[in-house]
Image (cartoon, grey):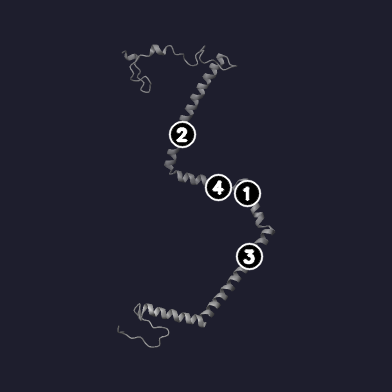
Amino acid sequence: MDPASQDINLNSPNKALGVDRTDSLSDVPVEGAMGNPANPPPPGLTEEEAEELRTELTKVEEEINTLRQVLCAKERHAAELKRKLGLNPLNELRQNLTRSWQDVQTSNAYLSASATLDDITHSDAYKKTQETLSQAGQKTTAALSTMSTALSKKIGDMRNSPTFKSFEDKMGNLKYKVVGQRGNGDAVSSPTDTTPTQENPSF
């Protein structure tokens, strides 16, 4: 096999096939060639106009690729500068949010809404509503205070009643029966027991 006809491009679909394809490629029509019947010009265009548009399209696509490469290089350079300045994505996000909030605060819609809200807070209806709510809050506080005082007095009266004292005696007797004479190391006497407890009771 002739080394000159061997394809040395590693990205080529013909790599490592070792087949001479020069004669098979010679019959393939070249796209965009003049007089190519397989690719006729669009209606309303002559062959020369179509060829001119194809050439322009090729140039524009090459420019687009060049601009993409330039943009990638600029983005890499910007990222490197940010890294050197110590700007990380979190700081950048914080700065963007701060800048956006400042933009919102200076926007016409925000200023208009703020002015409207200010007008509302200084209106007579707002002041009357605020006074009414304040008075209602004061009356509610006074009513709750009165109710609390009455409830405390009622509970105090109940503690002094004979029914509550009888209940308290029964609970004390129950505790005496459950805990015994010495619960928690202290001598416990029944509330109704008037005799002193023995130091060493016999069992």
Q: Earlier in the sequence, mark 1 or mark 3?
A: 1
Q: Are marks 1 and 3 in contact (CB under 8 Å)?
A: no
Q: Earlier in the sequence, mark 4 or mark 1?
A: 4
Q: Where is residue 38 shown, x and y percent of the image?
A: 50, 14
- Front of the two marks 3 and 2: 3
Q: Residue at x 55, y 47 (%)?
A: 101
The residue type indicated by label 2 comes to Lys
* CA distance separating discs 4 and 1: 13 Å
Residue that badge 2 annotates: 74
SS at circle 2: helix
* CA distance separating discs 1 and 2: 38 Å
| Quadrant placement of the N terminus | top left
Q: Earlier in the sequence, mark 4 or mark 2?
A: 2
Residue that badge 1 annotates: 111
Counting the numbered discs, the total is 4
Residue that badge 3 annotates: 134
Q: Camera-side residue: 176 or 120?
A: 176
- Front of the two marks 1 and 3: 3
